[in-house]
Image (spheres, rainbow, N blue to C red):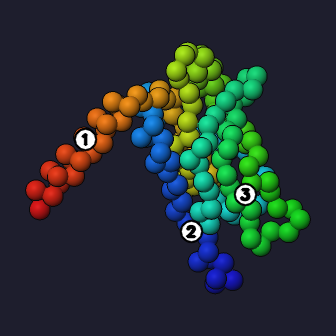
Amino acid sequence: MGKDKQRFSSSINIKNRKASYEFSFIDTYTAGMQLQGTEIKSIREGKVQMQDAFCYFQGEELFVKQLHISPYAQGTHYNHVSDRERKLLLKKRELEKLHEKSDEKGLSIIPTRLFINDRGFAKLDIALAKGKKLHDKRDSIKDRDTKRELDRMKF
C-alpha cells in the first residue's frame, strides 16, 4: 500500500506547451471532465498527452478530442479507451459564449492545462485561441530570449 501512494502524485499540473507557441489566447475557462473507469488513476500517475488535443461543439455540448490518457497499468478488462472523446462540463452561459465566439473565422478552442483541484476532481483549462502567423512566432521567441538575457544580467 505504501508503494501505491508514491505512484499517485497529489499535485498534477500537465501543461500544453505547444499551445502557447502556436496560438495567442483570447479568453480562458476552467472546465470539468466526464471521466470513465480508470482514467482518473492514469491522470494521477501523470500519463496524459495533450499536444494535439482540441475542443469542438456537438449540438449544445463541448467535447475534447485527441486527449490521450494512457490505459491504467493495473487495470483489468474494465480499463478505459485511451483516445475517446470526453465531454467537458461548463456552465450554460459559458458554453453559449464559447459557441458564439468559436463560430468566428480563425478562432478555436484549445486545452492548455490539466490539473486536479483541491476536491480531487480533474479539471481542464481551455482557451479560446487564434492561430499565430510565422512572424508572431518569431516575435515570441525573440521576447523570450531577451527576457532570459535580462534575468541572467540580474544575477
Name the residue type under label 1: Lys
Percent coordinates x, y for residue 25 in the rendering = 44, 32
Please name the residue that numbered disc 2 is placed on.
9
Residue projecting furthest to the right: 77
Residue projecting furthest to the bottom: 2
Residue 10 position by quadrant? bottom right
At x 52%, y 21%, the residue is: 106
Spatial CA span between label 2 and label 3: 14 Å
At x 62%, y 66%, the residue is: 45
Residue projecting furthest to the front: 134
Element under label 2? Answer: loop
Left or right of residue 89, residue 14 in this image: left
Q: Which mark is residue 39?
A: 3
Indicate which label's residue lies in the foreground, 1 or 2: 1
Percent coordinates x, y for residue 53 in the rendering = 61, 42
Percent coordinates x, y for residue 76 in the rendering = 85, 69
